[in-house]
Image (tube, rainbow, N blue to C red):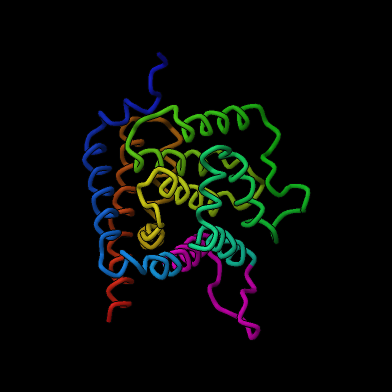
Amino acid sequence: MTADPLAPLLDLPGVAAAAEEAGEALAAVHRHPVNLRGWDKTSRESSWRGGRSSAAMEGATTELNREHDFDDPVMSGAIRVAQALDPDALDREVSVFRRAPMQSLARLHSLAAAELVAAEKLGRPRDEPHIAQRLDMLGQLITGATTVPAAVLAAVVHGEILVLAPFEQGNAVVARGVSRLVSAATGLDPHLLGVPEVTWLRRLGDYRETSARFATGDPQALADWILLCCEAMRSGADEAKSIADAARG
């Protein structure tokens, strides 16, 4: 039997406990009275807030023009990614992601970078051997090569895409979108109620520094990145609760 490549991460200080806490927080917000039946409203608002925050992390302007659209191409792309993961489209996207994760990755890039790169480069990773190898590894992890808690898998996939930067542009928005897809596909956050992007935006310096250190493979750096992601998931559940509370009035 092939050893689980991510299993050693659970031995890093605080990782297992943080992943459990993130899962419990997201499960609790799914049990919120509003979300038992009206979860789609919370999910749609979560997608919107997540998309705006993800784009803002890249320095995009969040202001609408007179046509109630975004002039900033990064913001427009992040919102398209968010719409692909909202309640109207999520089941379809998750179905594809579970069986063909690289197809979903390509689709998210096509949405995120539609106004940033030439059409022929949309959804196409850079032609370098190490990129193909790492993406293949991620695909295997997503489709069952690991049994670590979903919060850990989401953090690893997120960090790997940030570090690998497989596309010419739009990698960070795609990485956060794929992290959401992992959360949905694994059942960690099946309706995508959480808004972890709010915490990542608020702690942008930590996010950038910790993700850069993740690339070194140093055990403490790996732990710090996973802990930051789990913290964002816990805080994202609080954000989801505030959305549901406001809907209840």
Is 172 above or below relative to 245? above
Residue 223: name its quadrant.
top left
Quadrant, the N terminus: top left
Tell me where residue 84 appears, x and y as whole percent.
56, 59
Residue 64 in the magenta stretch? The answer is yes
Quadrant, the C terminus: bottom left
Taking the spot 32% from the left edge, 65% from the top edge, the residue there is 35
Looking at the image, which is closer to me, 41 or 195? 41
Looking at the image, which is closer to me, 110 or 31? 31
Instruction: Specify whether 243 is left or right of 141.
Output: left
Instruction: Specify whether 121 is left or right of 69.
Output: right
- Count of marks placed on residues: 0
Looking at the image, which is closer to me, 95 or 66? 95
Taking the spot 36% from the left edge, 41% from the top edge, the residue there is 150
Is 145 above or below relative to 210? above
Q: Which residues are magenta?
A: 46-72
Tell me where residue 111 appears, x and y as whole percent.
64, 57
Residue 97 in the magenta stretch? The answer is no
Residue 246: name its quadrant.
bottom left
Instruction: Specify whether 101 is left or right of 111.
Output: left
Q: Residue furthest bottom?
A: 66
Tell me where residue 42 appears, x and y as whole percent.
38, 68
